[in-house]
Each structure stands twice: as structure tokens, then as C-alpha cells.
Image (cartoon, rainbow, N blue to C red):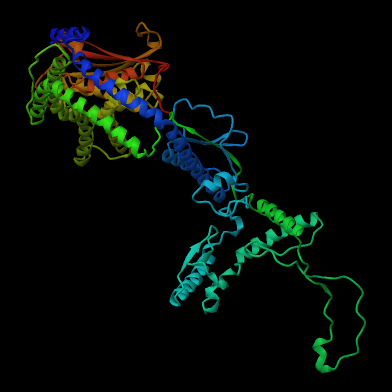
């Protein structure tokens, strides 16, 4: 097999001569097709490029206006820009462009750029998103434009005029009744809801005064609600304060922010002359009415001043209800895109003629070249279908040394490799069962002992069962963690662990199984058992438990399994100072010298029958090695056939430098 791989590697390194390669045979055909296509498309591109650029610019402006309007609506309805990221990403996905928002000091708020290195923003912003000062040029291009160009405040910014649910419901019921009434008398009408939640009745047609002669005049909807009165009063006060600074009189604003005649105010002056005492019947008219100044008439200058103050008052009132101004940047996400455009009939005819010529040449050349190429591909297809139908090893003949021949050789190698993987897959169930059997057997043994009255279900007993259940869960996770360990990213939860307590816990967990097998399981006290080691207690207990389980399994009745640990104070360290050594020694059958290099390989077993009576799946020792490496340590074994084995786990006393941990 190694010679085959070496030969295949040699063929891969050698280059196929151009005259024999698939590339060489297709090169001549491609040259003819390319020459025709380039000649046909070059002059068409010159004629259509300028028109395409103009149309693309128009499309980009429309898309920019739509993006601006959407973000403007967001700012009008939210007091801050928090949560705008989703809207920005959606707009970027719809338009295929990069959309970014920053504060006026260019602090980022949201950016749709997904590259690892985000490109710098251009020096000039595309627009300023400010619902209190709308860009009328972009707003005019939006299909959702509202209001007039003279009103720079976005009508979606309603602030305190936003109606609560109760007022909305009451107005909606009134509007629905008005619409039904108008429809009954033959006037088509619909209910339209404004940004503040206020409904209004909109009549279809250009004569809205038709409803005045009916009994269902919708004018009663114009009365302001309690919320609107409160907001309108506050707005009126702000506008009056502005007018007062200009030494102008007060103004009364209507619900639609229009104004009419001035406010009538009392006129200071001397009291009127006293009148004769009235008769009792005229007592109600005895008190003279105070003198008032009649409502003043507004001049054009007054109207301009009032409009300015109302706009200033609205901006001041809404400033706390809308998002602060932000800079909008719109650009290309990943380079220029191909513009879409409609061709004229003349250009369409030219393209159709050139395409027909190129198609004819391509079809003729493809028929000639494809006839010789598809035959070996048909053979590969048939072999793949046979493999799909269950043949363990489907191969195809290798007819040459060109690309198709090498593809056939690679397919044969893949087929053989698939057969080997299938054998491993069939063994996977038993491999997993081995790792699950040990903790389940311990839990079952303790529960049966409690059922038979041999063990007292005290808190220590329950704690032991809980630890075994946790270890069982971790073993299941380790089947996935083996792949992470191979990549060097096995995650640990390190904490200070007393080695003696850990060995006692492992021995207690396997005591019942050892007694059943007639094996003496002991922990040898030593100076190392008092050592505190930074490690993951669950992972380390799993590693030592796998070694103990393996030792008990291969030790005959009457034998002994001993757990011991050594620290620096014991004077039995290995060459690398600062290690904690944990040994699991048994007096079992031992391991043949020829098998020692393979015992930590995944799925390897010396007893090839993989009997449950003689061993597990061969996964336990592989997990021990991966867990030891994850802790920065090593595991090794010495064995004498017929006398026993000693497995040695060496771990750095201070914890490994490169441990992949979770805090």
C-alpha cells in the first residue's frame, strides 16, 4: 500500500505533457470561441457603457434616497440610535451597498461592512440623518416622501402628539362610523391612520366638500384629544415665548398647527363711568363687560415670524423624542456591480446575431471534444452508482496518464479508503459503548449494593453516585472532545485539586467492581497525596478512572491494583522538575513488548475479537493520552508480560503554560 501511495505521489508530482493533457485539447477549441466572443462583445460594450453608467447612477440615487428615508423614519420614531444595526444590515442587503452611520464627531453607530478589515469611511458623508432638518433633495426622490419641501421636520416625528391606545381606539371607532356612513350615501371613503395614530376619513375623489350636505360630516374627528391638547398647549407656549422675544403678540395654534386670528386680550385703561342702578329684572346685565382688544389681523411679516417660531418650537419640543443627528455614509461593499439596463431593439438584434454565431461555433467544437471526454466519465458515474448501491469496493479501469486517468486512479483510492472507513464505522457502536459502560456499571453496582442492604444511602453515597453521573456526562462529551483535542482546543476547567482526595474518589468509585472481580484496590499513602495540583478535577478523575478500570479488567482474581502519587518532597520526580507523578500499578497479565507502542492509539486492542469479557473498545487509553496532553503532561507505561503493568501519568505541578481553559 505504501508503494502504491508513493507511486501515485510520483505521478502527481510529474506534469502531464501539454499535447496529451485535457488542457491542451481544449486550448485550441477555447481559442477559437474566445476570439469570436471577444470580437463580438468589444464593440457592443463601447456602445452600451455610457447608457449603463447613466442608468446605474439613477438607480443608486433612488436606492440612496430609500436608505435615507428608512433611517430618517427610524430616527423620527426612536429617541436614540440603539438597535439600528439590524435596520442598517437589512438596507445593505437589499441595496447591495455598504451603509454606515456615525455621530457628527464620526464615532461609529452602525456599519454593514463584514470584511475582516473594515475600510475607512470617505471624508465626506452622503447625507445627515436629522428628522428635525430633512434633506429635501433626498426626501423628494423617496417614494415614501411625506409633507412638503418647506417643512424640514419629518412628519413621522410626532413626539408628545403620539396618541395612546385608548384615544386611538376611540377615534378609530368614530372614523369607522363616519366612513360607513359616507359609503352608505354613495361617497367612497377610507380610513387613513397618520404617524401619530390619529385616523382620518379620506374621501375618494377631488370634491371633499360633498360630505358637508350629509348627516355624516367627518368634521367631528378634527377635535383634539386630551393628549393632543396637552402637547398643543406646550407647543403654543414655546411659540409664544419665541414671539415675545421678538416683541410680537401671542398666537393660538390649531391642531393642524395652522393659526388664524390673534388672541383677544383685555385692554387696560380707566374704568367706565357708572351707570344708573338697573332694575331687578336687568340685574344680570348690571356688571359691564371688560374692554378687550379685538383680534388683530396678521400681516405677511407676522405670518413669516409665526411660521419661524412654530418651527423653532416644534424642534425644541421634539428634540427629546427623536434620535440625534447622524452622518450617513453609503458606498460600494465589494467593488462595482454590473448594471442592469434595457437595450434598444437595434442593440438587441446585434447581440442576438453575435450570440447565435458564438453558440454555433461552441456547439460544434464541444461536440467533437466532448465525445472523447464523456466516455471515461460515464465509467466513473457507473462506478459511483455501484458504490451507492452497496458495493464495498467499486473501481474503474485507468486508461491513461492524463487528467481523466488520474481522476480514475484517485477514484479507486477513494473507493478503497471508503471501504476502510466503513469498517471503522461498524466498530463505532462498540467503541462508544466501552466508554459508557464503566460509569454506568459503577452506578449500578452502588445501587444494587444499597438495594441489597450492603451500602447505606447516606449523603456520601448519594454524592458518589452524583459524581459518577457527572463523569458519565463528561465521557459522552469527550467523544466529541477528542476531535477538539486533536486540534489543540480541548477546553478545561482548572481549579486546585488535592491529589490524595482525587485518588480516593476514583478508588471508591471502582471499589465495587474490583471486589466483584476479586481484585484488591488500594491507595498507597505518600507525601505526594497531599500535593495540590491545578487541574480540571473531572477530566483528571476521568483519566485516572480509565487507567484503574483498565487495570482491574486485566488483573485476575487475587491480584492487586495500587494507586500512588509522588511529589517533590518524596524525591521521586522525573527529570523534569516540578512534576506530579500519578501511578496505577497492577499485578495483571501484562502487555507484550510488541504491543506497547500501540496501546494509546485510538480504537486499538491487542485482543482483536474485542470481546466485552476481555476488554473495551480501545478508546479509553486514547482519551487518557489526550487528557494528559491537554494538561501539559504525558502518560507512559511499563509492563512485564505475566507480572503486571504500571501506567504513569506525569503532570506539571504548577499547571501547564498553554492549557486551554474556561474561567
Q: Nearer the viewer, residue 194 or 604?
A: 194
Residue at the image point whose x is 47% and y is 38% from the top: 60
Asked whether residue 467 appears in the rendered view, the answer is no
In this picture, residue 596 sits left or right of residue 283: left
- Judge left or right: residue 164 versus residue 549: right
Q: In this view, does 90 lie above or below 356?
A: below
Q: In this view, does 356 lie above or below 636?
A: below
Residue 199, percent across and down?
Answer: 52, 65
The image quarter in which residue 235 lies: bottom right
Question: Considering the image in quadrants, where does the C terminus appear?
Answer: top left
**Is residue 3 or residue 611 the one in the foreground?**
3
* 299 on left or right of 580: right
Residue 589 seen from this side = yes
Observer-nearest residue: 450 or 302? 302
Observer-nearest of 300 and 356: 356
**From what the image shows, is residue 635 above or below residue 480?**
above
Residue 206, image x, y percentages: 51, 67
Q: Quadrant of residue 474?
A: top left
Where is residue 401 shown, x and y percent of the image? 14, 11
Amino acid at each position: 500500500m505504501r508503494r502504491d501511495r508513493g507511486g501515485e505521489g510520483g505521478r502527481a508530482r510529474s506534469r502531464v505533457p501539454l499535447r496529451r493533457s485535457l488542457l491542451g485539447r481544449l486550448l485550441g477549441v477555447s481559442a477559437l470561441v474566445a476570439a469570436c466572443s471577444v470580437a463580438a462583445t468589444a464593440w457592443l460594450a463601447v456602445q452600451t457603457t455610457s447608457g449603463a453608467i447613466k442608468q446605474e447612477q439613477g438607480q443608486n440615487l433612488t436606492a440612496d434616497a430609500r436608505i435615507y428615508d428608512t433611517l430618517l423614519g427610524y430616527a423620527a420614531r426612536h429617541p436614540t440610535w440603539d438597535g439600528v444595526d439590524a435596520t442598517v444590515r437589512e438596507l445593505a442587503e437589499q441595496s447591495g451597498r455598504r451603509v454606515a452611520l456615525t455621530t457628527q464627531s464620526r464615532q461609529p453607530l452602525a456599519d454593514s461592512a463584514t470584511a475582516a478589515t473594515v475600510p475607512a469611511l470617505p471624508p465626506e458623508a452622503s447625507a445627515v440623518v436629522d428628522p428635525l432638518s430633512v434633506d429635501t433633495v433626498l426626501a423628494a426622490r423617496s417614494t415614501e416622501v411625506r409633507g412638503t419641501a418647506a417643512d424640514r421636520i419629518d412628519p413621522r416625528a410626532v413626539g408628545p402628539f403620539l396618541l395612546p391606545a385608548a384615544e386611538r381606539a376611540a377615534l378609530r371607532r368614530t372614523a369607522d362610523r363616519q366612513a360607513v356612513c359616507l359609503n352608505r350615501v354613495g361617497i367612497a371613503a377610507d380610513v387613513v391612520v397618520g404617524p401619530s395614530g390619529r385616523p382620518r376619513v379620506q374621501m375618494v375623489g377631488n370634491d371633499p366638500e360633498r360630505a358637508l350636505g350629509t348627516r355624516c360630516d367627518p368634521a367631528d374627528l378634527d377635535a383634539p384629544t386630551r393628549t393632543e391638547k396637552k402637547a398643543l398647549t406646550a407647543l403654543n407656549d414655546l411659540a409664544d415665548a419665541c414671539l415675545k422675544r421678538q416683541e410680537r403678540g401671542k398666537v393660538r395654534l390649531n391642531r393642524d398647527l395652522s393659526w388664524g386670528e390673534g388672541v383677544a386680550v383685555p385692554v387696560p385703561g380707566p374704568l367706565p363711568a357708572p351707570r344708573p342702578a338697573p332694575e331687578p329684572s336687568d340685574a344680570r346685565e348690571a356688571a359691564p363687560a371688560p374692554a378687550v382688544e379685538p383680534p388683530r389681523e396678521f400681516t405677511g411679516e407676522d405670518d413669516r415670524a409665526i411660521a419661524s417660531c412654530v418651527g423653532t418650537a416644534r424642534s425644541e419640543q421634539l428634540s427629546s423624542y427623536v434620535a440625534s443627528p447622524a452622518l450617513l455614509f453609503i458606498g460600494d461593499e465589494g467593488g462595482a456591480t454590473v448594471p442592469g439596463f434595457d437595450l434598444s431593439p437595434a442593440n438587441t438584434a446585434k447581440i442576438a446575431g453575435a450570440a447565435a454565431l458564438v453558440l454555433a461555433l461552441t456547439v460544434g467544437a464541444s461536440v467533437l471534444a466532448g465525445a472523447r471526454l464523456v466516455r471515461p466519465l460515464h465509467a466513473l458515474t457507473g462506478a459511483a452508482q455501484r458504490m451507492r448501491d452497496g458495493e464495498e469496493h467499486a473501481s474503474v479501469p485507468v486508461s491513461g496518464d492524463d487528467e481523466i486517468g488520474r481522476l480514475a486512479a484517485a477514484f479507486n483510492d477513494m473507493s478503497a479508503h471508503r471501504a476502510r472507513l466503513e469498517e471503522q464505522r461498524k466498530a463505532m457502536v462498540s467503541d462508544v459503548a466501552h466508554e459508557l459502560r464503566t460509569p454506568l456499571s459503577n452506578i449500578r453496582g452502588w445501587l444494587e449494593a444499597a438495594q441489597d442492604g450492603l451500602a447505606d444511602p447516606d449523603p456520601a453515597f448519594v454524592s458518589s453516585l452524583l459524581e459518577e453521573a457527572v463523569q458519565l456526562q463528561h465521557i459522552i462529551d469527550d467523544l466529541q472532545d477528542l476531535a477538539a483535542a486533536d486540534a489543540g482546543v480541548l477546553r478545561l476547567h482548572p481549579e486546585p485539586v488535592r491529589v490524595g482526595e482525587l485518588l480516593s474518589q476514583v478508588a471508591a468509585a471502582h471499589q465495587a467492581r474490583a471486589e466483584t472481580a476479586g481484585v484488591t484496590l488500594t491507595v498507597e499513602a505518600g507525601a505526594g497525596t497531599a500535593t495540590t495540583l491545578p487541574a480540571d478535577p473531572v477530566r483528571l478523575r476521568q483519566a485516572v478512572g480509565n487507567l484503574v478500570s483498565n487495570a482491574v479488567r486485566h488483573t485476575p482474581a487475587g491480584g492487586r491494583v495500587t494507586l500512588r502519587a509522588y511529589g517533590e518532597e518524596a524525591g521521586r520526580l522525573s527529570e523534569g522538575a516540578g512534576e506530579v507523578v500519578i501511578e496505577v500499578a497492577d499485578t495483571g497479565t501484562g502487555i507484550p513488548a510488541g504491543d506497547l507502542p500501540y496501546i494509546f492509539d485510538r480504537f486499538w486492542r491487542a485482543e482483536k475479537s474485542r470481546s466485552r469479557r476481555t476488554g473495551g473498545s480501545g478508546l479509553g487509553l486514547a482519551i487518557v493520552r489526550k487528557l494528559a496532553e491537554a494538561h501539559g503532561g504525558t502518560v507512559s507505561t511499563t509492563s512485564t508480560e505475566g507480572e503486571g503493568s504500571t501506567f504513569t501519568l506525569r503532570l506539571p505541578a504548577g499547571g501547564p503554560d498553554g492549557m486551554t481553559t474556561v474561567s
